[in-house]
Image (spheres, coloured by chain):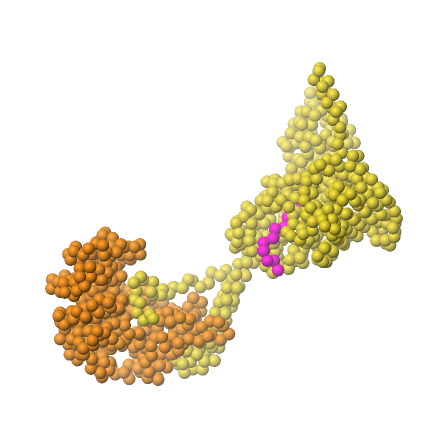
Chain colours: A orange, B yellow
């Protein structure tokens, strides 16, 4: 990671924003239909890079043009967000993406229409802008909502404050949205590996059982699909501290997809995959094979619904689920026709997960790639 | 021959019943089957006659109609016109005899055909209230006659209750006053609707209606009467044995040959000979003979002639006997009563069904003050309000694929559309005596369909043009709507002046807009957005969501 001072970064991003504006102005000056080029962030324009093991953004670019009524509104919103970001940077403040939404929201004169109606309208535009400028929202002085917690033997320097993640009680250290090296650095770490857990409830179980102490590891939850801060932290823990990453999710297609996002990056944020993905992460469970292996009672499994089956078949076609082990697991789940939640392990006893299941899996290195 | 004796005995017991008696028992056949409809029919008969008379006398018709409730379900109906009037001697016969009329025996386009209408109204009034009908008429000679007439039902003869001369100055025309049972309503098939449609199909007429609910004025939209239709001789293709027999009896021709050439249209001596040959009418030497006297033709020979005619190629009858409205008048009529945004009319060339000339005209009006679909059928300018479903015009409408023309609706179109269909003919083939639906001869269905298609094509062009223009306008509005904010943002990014930028954007938008309007068919419209936004994928991150 290139170490840049904040000031340099601000100047660079501001320059990019001004360039964007000048580009549009140049087109207007030539009486051309103004447009902004945006990398296409969809399945049609991503590829799986075998070498890096990451989902990467392709070359395809779409033009968001003013004189196409399907784009006009988004074109305006793109420029509004760009202008607002320039303002925020110049004021040297950091705001949330919700603040950004409110900052650009106003009623368009002589209409009943707002510039943005909903945050769900401004969020994807911001992502477009990040991709178009090849920058991070953090560099635009924006932060996402925080999501995710860490516990375990690590000392973190969070903007000057030393945080001992082994002394964070029952709640853990909350992962900030921006964990870039200029703000967060790792001071001391004795953990042997990192366990990333989909579910907060399971994280709390493991924290209460002091699993991280017994196994000498860090436990992290992303509370569902992990936010970028959480994914970036995992990426850095692996890259900088060389810690192995194990991922624990529900035994269902949704959980498997969460794993793949942590490992290879996501389609929507494929332009950030090298920062957010951790290709060497391993999948610890749950799998349908665990049901047999640990003799989990069948009555705690859940029957697959139509959406599950459709999703399963889709995922089998993704390049990054090509390894035989994954194809077998996906096929097997479709074959047995059930899925199971992490909590299903409690059927074998409340501490079964922390005292039996995880230690055995880790010991036997019973992972999926 | 006992059978013959019996038959003759039975024949002695039968007696002739008069048409009046027949009507008394079968008034539903003429449409008098309910009290609401009865009022409408009486007004209709009066107005139709008034229009026919005025037109024939080349007078711009001005008609006054009054409907007044005297007591519950008892009405006074007055119809007054400015026509030529009726000569004194004919007044009692016309109003007091069923099936007395000048129109039945001649072949010329007119509203009335059978000579039944107005005397039936007299009859109906008399049957329901016992009241006589008052007829006032003047031919403009300064003498105005006022009659009170009833019908002598047994003998189908007028019964004159009073006959006086009144002073009406120089007025000419006819004024009739009926007192009859009825119910007045202003719904779909009402006097008001009938008069409105009459005003559309007779745009040269001025009609005033003094209804129980107030006055309505239908002013004239054009100041010219349609061309006067001429009488024609019948065409052999439409002649049946009965008519042939009647004509043979009445003819002054001395030979069959001259009967055929003089009494029918489009029969020359070659065609007459061919008919005679094909019908196998031979003289004493066994060769075809046209010198036979028309009076001596046997029934078998008449049947042979009617059959033979079908194998002989005859020219179509002349069509100058028709008096179509003309597409211009159709448009004007629709315009003045419906005030639509778009209007078009198609007048087909005259053609022939079973030897009778006819012509179809169609008008289409769209938008404006038309609120919902309206279908108007006319026969010789008379609105047909009942039996829509049985009518050839409706059946033809149902064969059009309205959606292909950018309209809604399955069998009949929906939306703010008015369809006007007019059949002009010397003899309109109604499905019943009440004259409410046109019979479905294939050639009539075809003509209506072709006219509708032509008119609908024009409407469809208008609609797509409008949609295109509307689309372009909305597109321009979108360009204008976001220009302000886009300019402000660009100003913030570049430090340029926001107002200046907005002007630049608007100028380009205007150019784009004008070019799009110029493009003939909106092919250069926006392709569907190529942009594929992310997030389609299932299982994408829900990060940052609140």
For the C terminus of chain A, give its image quadrant.
bottom left
Q: Is residue B297 magenta?
A: no
Q: Nearer the viewer, residue A175 or A74?
A: A175
Q: Quadrant of residue A95?
A: bottom left
Q: Is residue B65 above or below residue B152?
A: below
**Which residue is situated farthest in the left direction here?**
A363
Q: Tell me if A217 is positioned left or right of B354 in this view.
A: left
Q: Is residue B402 above or below residue A263?
A: above
> Residue B401 in the image: x percent, y percent?
52, 49
Q: Is residue B275 visible?
A: no
Residue span colored magenta: B369-379
Q: Is residue B371 magenta?
A: yes
Residue at the image point whose x is 31% and y is 67% from the top: B542
Q: Nearer the viewer, residue B183 or B322?
A: B183
Q: Quadrant of residue B462?
A: bottom right
Residue at the image point whose x is 17% and y is 58% from the top: A290
Residue at the image point whose x is 73% and y is 35% from the top: B22
Q: Quadrant of residue A306?
A: bottom left
> Residue B249 in the image: x percent, y percent?
76, 29
> Residue B168 in the image: x percent, y percent?
86, 53
**Which residue is situated farthest in the front direction here?**
A349
Q: Tell me if A146 is positioned left or right of B326 in this view.
A: left
Q: Nearer the viewer, residue B71 or B249?
A: B71
Q: Is residue B127 visible?
A: yes
Q: Is residue B251 above or below residue B92?
A: above
For the N terminus of chain A, give its image quadrant.
bottom left
């Amino acid at each position: 990671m290139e170490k840049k001072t904040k000031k340099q970064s601000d100047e660079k991003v501001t320059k990019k924003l001004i360039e964007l504006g000048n580009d549009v102005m140049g087109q207007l000056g030539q009486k051309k239909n103004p447009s902004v080029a945006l990398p296409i962030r969809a399945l049609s324009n991503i590829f799986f890079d075998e070498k890096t093991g990451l989902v990467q953004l392709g070359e395809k670019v779409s033009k968001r043009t003013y004189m196409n009524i399907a784009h006009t509104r988004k074109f305006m919103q793109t420029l509004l967000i760009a202008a607002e970001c320039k303002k925020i940077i110049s004021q040297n403040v950091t705001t949330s993406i919700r603040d950004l939404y409110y900052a650009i929201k106003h009623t368009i004169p002589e209409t009943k229409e707002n510039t943005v109606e909903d945050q769900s309208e401004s969020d994807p535009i911001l992502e477009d802008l990040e991709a178009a400028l090849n920058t991070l929202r953090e560099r635009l002085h924006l932060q996402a909502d925080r999501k995710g917690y860490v516990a375990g033997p690590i000392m973190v320097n969070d903007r000057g404050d030393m945080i001992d993640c082994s002394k964070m009680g029952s709640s853990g250290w909350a992962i900030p949205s921006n964990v870039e090296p200029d703000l967060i650095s790792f001071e001391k770490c004795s953990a042997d590996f990192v366990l990333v857990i989909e579910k907060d409830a399971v994280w709390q179980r493991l924290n209460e059982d002091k699993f991280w102490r017994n196994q000498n590891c860090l436990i992290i939850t992303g509370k569902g699909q992990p936010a970028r801060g959480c994914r970036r932290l995992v990426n850095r823990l692996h890259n900088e501290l060389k810690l192995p990453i194990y991922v624990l999710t529900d035994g269902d297609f949704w959980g498997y997809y969460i794993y793949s996002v942590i490992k290879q990056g996501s389609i929507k944020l494929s332009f950030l995959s090298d920062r957010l993905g951790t290709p060497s992460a391993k999948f610890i469970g749950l799998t349908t094979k665990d049901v047999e292996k640990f003799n989990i009672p069948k009555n705690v499994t859940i029957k697959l619904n139509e959406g599950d089956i459709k999703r399963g078949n889709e995922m089998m076609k993704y390049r990054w689920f090509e390894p035989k082990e994954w194809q077998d697991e996906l096929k097997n789940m479709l074959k047995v026709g059930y899925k199971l939640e992490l909590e299903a392990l409690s059927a074998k006893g409340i501490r079964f997960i922390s005292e039996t299941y995880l230690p055995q899996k880790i010991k036997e290195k019973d992972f999926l790639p | 021959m006992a059978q013959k004796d019996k038959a003759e005995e039975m024949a002695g017991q039968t007696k002739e019943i008069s048409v009046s008696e027949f009507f008394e028992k079968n008034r539903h056949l003429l449409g008098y089957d309910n009290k609401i409809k009865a009022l409408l029919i009486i007004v209709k008969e009066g107005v139709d006659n008034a229009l026919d008379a005025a037109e024939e006398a080349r007078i711009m018709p001005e008609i006054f109609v009054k409907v007044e409730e005297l007591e519950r379900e008892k009405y006074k109906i007055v119809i007054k016109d400015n026509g030529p009037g009726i000569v004194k001697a004919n007044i009692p016969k016309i109003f007091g005899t069923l099936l007395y009329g000048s129109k039945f025996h001649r072949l010329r386009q007119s509203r009335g055909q059978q000579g039944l209408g107005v005397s039936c109204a007299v009859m109906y009034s008399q049957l329901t209230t016992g009241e006589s009908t008052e007829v006032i008429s003047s031919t403009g000679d300064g003498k105005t006659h006022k009659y009170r007439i009833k019908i002598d039902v047994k003998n189908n003869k007028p019964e004159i209750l009073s006959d006086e001369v009144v002073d009406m100055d120089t007025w000419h025309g006819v004024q009739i006053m009926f007192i009859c049972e009825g119910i007045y309503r202003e719904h779909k098939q009402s006097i008001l609707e009938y008069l409105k449609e009459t005003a559309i199909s007779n745009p040269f007429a001025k009609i005033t209606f003094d209804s129980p609910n107030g006055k309505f004025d239908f002013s004239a939209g054009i100041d010219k009467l349609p061309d006067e239709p001429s009488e024609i001789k019948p065409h052999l293709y439409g002649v049946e044995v009965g008519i042939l027999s009647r004509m043979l009896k009445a003819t002054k021709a001395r030979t069959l040959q001259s009967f055929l050439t003089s009494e029918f249209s489009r029969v020359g001596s070659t065609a007459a000979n061919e008919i005679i040959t094909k019908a196998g009418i031979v003289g004493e030497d066994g060769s075809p003979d046209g010198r036979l006297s028309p009076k001596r033709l046997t029934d078998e020979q008449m049947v042979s002639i009617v059959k033979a005619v079908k194998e002989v190629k005859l020219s179509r009858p002349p069509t100058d006997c028709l008096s179509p409205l003309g597409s211009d008048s159709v448009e004007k009529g629709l315009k003045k009563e419906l005030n639509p945004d778009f209007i078009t009319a198609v007048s087909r060339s005259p053609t022939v069904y079973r030897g009778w000339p006819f012509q179809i005209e169609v008008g289409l009006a769209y938008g404006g003050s038309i609120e919902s679909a309206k279908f108007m059928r006319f026969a010789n300018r008379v609105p047909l309000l009942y039996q829509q479903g049985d009518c050839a015009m409706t059946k033809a409408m149902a064969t059009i694929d309205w959606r292909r023309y950018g309209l809604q609706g399955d069998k009949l179109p929906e939306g703010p559309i008015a369809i006007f269909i007019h059949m002009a003919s010397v003899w309109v083939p109604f499905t019943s005596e009440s004259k409410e639906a046109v019979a479905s001869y294939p050639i009539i269905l075809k003509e209506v369909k072709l006219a509708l298609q032509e008119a609908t094509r024009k409407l469809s062009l208008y609609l797509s043009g409008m949609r295109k223009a509307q689309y372009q306008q909305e597109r321009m509005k979108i360009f204008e709507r976001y220009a302000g904010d886009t300019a402000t943002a660009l100003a913030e990014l570049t430090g340029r002046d926001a107002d200046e930028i907005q002007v630049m954007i608007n100028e380009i938008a205007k150019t784009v807009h004008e070019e799009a309007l110029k493009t003939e068919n909106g092919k250069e419209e926006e392709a569907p957005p190529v942009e594929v936004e992310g997030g389609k994928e299932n299982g994408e991150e829900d990060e940052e969501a609140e």
